[in-house]
Amino acid sequence: MTDALEMDALWDEFHRVVNMTSAELAAWLRVSDAGETAEALPDRAGDETGQHVLAILQKRRTDLTDDDLRVMEEVVDAVTEQTDPENEPTAGDTPAGTT
């Protein structure tokens, strides 16, 4: 992805679907990784993708690597797929896995 317009579009879409600041995401990762008695260290909280998204949020657009762009595309695709209105249940639907 070397086209500046595509990169701009990906940047905008990534920041639309990742609707937290880096500080908010860092706090959320720590809480989601917390156990009953301890919280994960800030630089170890969350999974690899979560840490990579956090790093991207802390970068300028001009500092993005090819790996950053790949993760951004994966995140946009995953969020878009999960929030697709066609995947939303309608009234009367039974949740998957229940009878």
Image (cartoon, helix red, strand yellow):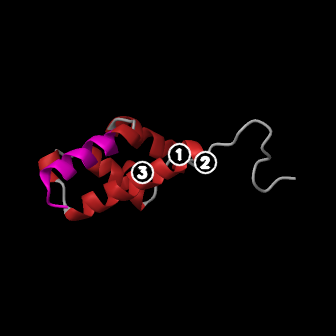
Identified by mark 3, the residue type is: Leu
Tell me the magenta residue range: 1-15
Question: Which numbered disc, 1 or 3, marks the residue closer to the eye?
Answer: 1
- Identify the mark at residue 84; answer none if there is no mark: 1
| 76 shown above or below 28 | below
Residue at 77% from the left image edge and 43% from the top image edge:
93
Residue at 38% from the left image edge and 58% from the top image edge:
74
Q: If you read the primary sequence from the N terminus, does the residue marked by circle 1 or circle 3 appear first?
A: 3
* SS at mark 2 in the image: helix
Q: Is residue 27 left or right of residue 52?
A: right
Q: Position of residue 51 (x, y in %)?
A: 37, 54
Magenta stretch: helix, strand or loop mostly: helix
* SS at mark 1 in the image: loop
Q: Position of residue 2 (x, y in %)?
A: 14, 60
Q: Residues within 10 Å of mark 1 (few under 14, many from 20)?
A: few
Report which residue position mark 2 lands on: 87
Q: Is residue 58 visible?
A: no
Say whether residue 5 is magenta: yes
Q: Is residue 55 left or right of residue 39?
A: left
Q: Residues within 10 Å of mark 2 (few under 14, many from 20)?
A: few
| 75 shown above or below 20 | below
Q: Position of residue 9 (x, y in %)?
A: 24, 45
Mark 1 and mark 3: Cα distance apart in space: 34 Å
Report which residue position mark 3 lands on: 41
- Identify the mark at residue 8; answer none if there is no mark: none
| 74 shown above or below 94 | below
Location of residue 25 by image quarter: top left
Question: Which numbered disc, 3 or 2, marks the residue closer to the eye?
Answer: 2
Q: Are marks 2 and 1 in contact (CB under 8 Å)?
A: yes
Q: Position of residue 34 (x, y in %)?
A: 55, 47
Residue at 63% from the left image edge and 47% from the top image edge:
36
Identified by mark 1, the residue type is: Asp
